Image (cartoon, grey):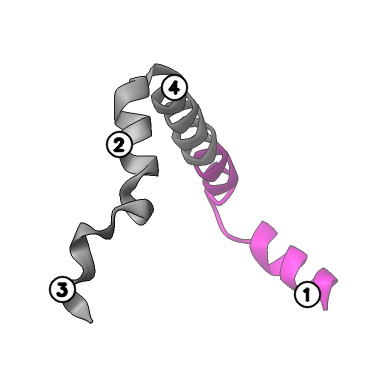
Amino acid sequence: MLKFVKNHMESIAGIEIYPIISLLIFFIFFVALFWWVISAKKDYINNVSNIPLDNQNDDIL
């Protein structure tokens, strides 16, 4: 089964660029996410982390 897929993929012209593009998208996304985590302000992190503990939004019940 794998030989069939490999031989079929080798017959498509220009397909070798897709793994490179997907790796670049993956790498850029996680570098940007890492940069956002490092540069996030501590006050924002504290406010967001306390949202589940806020009991003022009990109007749903």
The mark nearer the N terminus, 1 or 2, is 1
Q: Determine the CA span between mark 4 and mark 2.
A: 20 Å
Asked which secondary structure carries label 3, the reply is helix
Q: Determine the CA span between mark 2 and mark 3.
A: 21 Å
From the image, state whether disc 4 or disc 3 is nearer to you.
Answer: 3
Residue wearing tag 3: 59
Task: Please check the rendered image and state whether residue 42 is part of the magenta-colored stretch, yes or no.
Answer: no
Q: Are marks 4 and 1 in contact (CB under 8 Å)?
A: no
Asked which secondary structure carries label 2, the reply is helix
Tag 3: residue type? Asp
Q: Are marks 2 and 3 in contact (CB under 8 Å)?
A: no
The mark nearer the N terminus, 2 or 3, is 2
Q: Determine the CA span between mark 1 and mark 2.
A: 54 Å
Q: Residues within 10 Å of mark 4 (few under 14, many from 20)?
A: few
Tag 4: residue type? Trp
The mark nearer the N terminus, 1 or 3, is 1
**Magenta highlight range:** 1-23
User: Residue 39: horizontal and vertical position, in percent?
Assistant: 39, 17
| Quadrant into which the C terminus falls | bottom left
Tag 1: residue type? Phe
Residue wearing tag 2: 47
The mark nearer the N terminus, 4 or 3, is 4
Q: Residues within 10 Å of mark 2 (few under 14, many from 20)?
A: few
Residue wearing tag 4: 35
Which residue occupies 45% across, 36% down? 29
For residue 4, which numbered disc appears in the image?
1
From the image, state whether disc 4 or disc 1 is nearer to you.
Answer: 4
Q: Are marks 1 and 2 in contact (CB under 8 Å)?
A: no
